[in-house]
Amino acid sequence: MNIADSRPVHVVTIVWGAEFRQWFLDVCVPNQMTPGNLGALPAGSRYRVFTSADDVDALTTSEALRQAREVLPVDIVIEPESATGAPDRFRRMTASHAQALADAAQQDAAVVF
């Protein structure tokens, strides 16, 4: 199968809070930018970061995500209201995952968390 003929992929990360945000930007994104990772995804793929409203500016202006934008579109998505109001971090993350899956289904895209 030719990867160019494959359905698009949404690479989804959920991150909030300064400490985790910095690990994500300093370690995770550079690792995902290595050859054979993000750049190998089929046309129409997206890199989606679900986060709190407090983290949007730091993510939007980060050098790591600027470099990722050179490879594929990057969406900084404010977590759904159901996540913000969740009583614990696991339900908060699950609400964001549910939104990411619904978004991908509308675009007939595969999802990688």
Image (cartoon, helix red, strand yellow):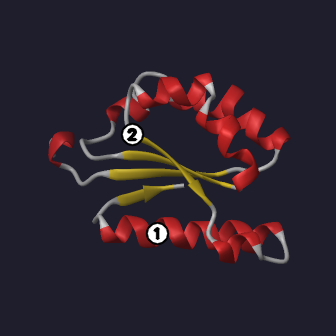
- The residue located at (36%, 59%) in the rendering is 110
Mark toward the start of the polypeptide (1 vs 2): 2
- The residue located at (43%, 58%) in the rendering is 111
Whole-number angstrom distance, CA of label 1 to CA of label 2: 18 Å
Q: Nearer the viewer, residue 92 or 76?
A: 76
Q: Name the residue under label 2.
A: 73
Which element type, helix, strand or loop, lies under badge 2? loop
Q: Is residue 67 above or below residue 112?
A: above
> Which kind of residue does numbered mark 2 sit on?
Pro
- Within 10 angstroms of label 2, few (less than 14), some, or many (20 or more) residues? some
Q: Is residue 47 left or right of residue 14?
A: left
Q: Name the residue under label 1.
A: 101
Q: Nearer the viewer, residue 61 or 23?
A: 61
- The residue located at (67%, 31%) in the rendering is 25
Rendered image quadrant of residue 28: top right
Rendered image quadrant of residue 79: bottom right
- Within 10 angstroms of label 1, few (less than 14), some, or many (20 or more) residues? some
Q: In which quarter of the image is the C terminus?
A: bottom right
- Residue 34 in percent (x, y) is at 49, 23
Q: Which of 97 and 57 is in front in this view?
A: 57
> Which kind of residue does numbered mark 1 sit on?
Leu
Circle nearer the viewer, 1 or 2: 2
Q: In this view, does 54 lie to the left or right of 113?
A: right
Label 1–label 2 contact, CB within 8 A: no
- Residue 95 in percent (x, y) is at 64, 73
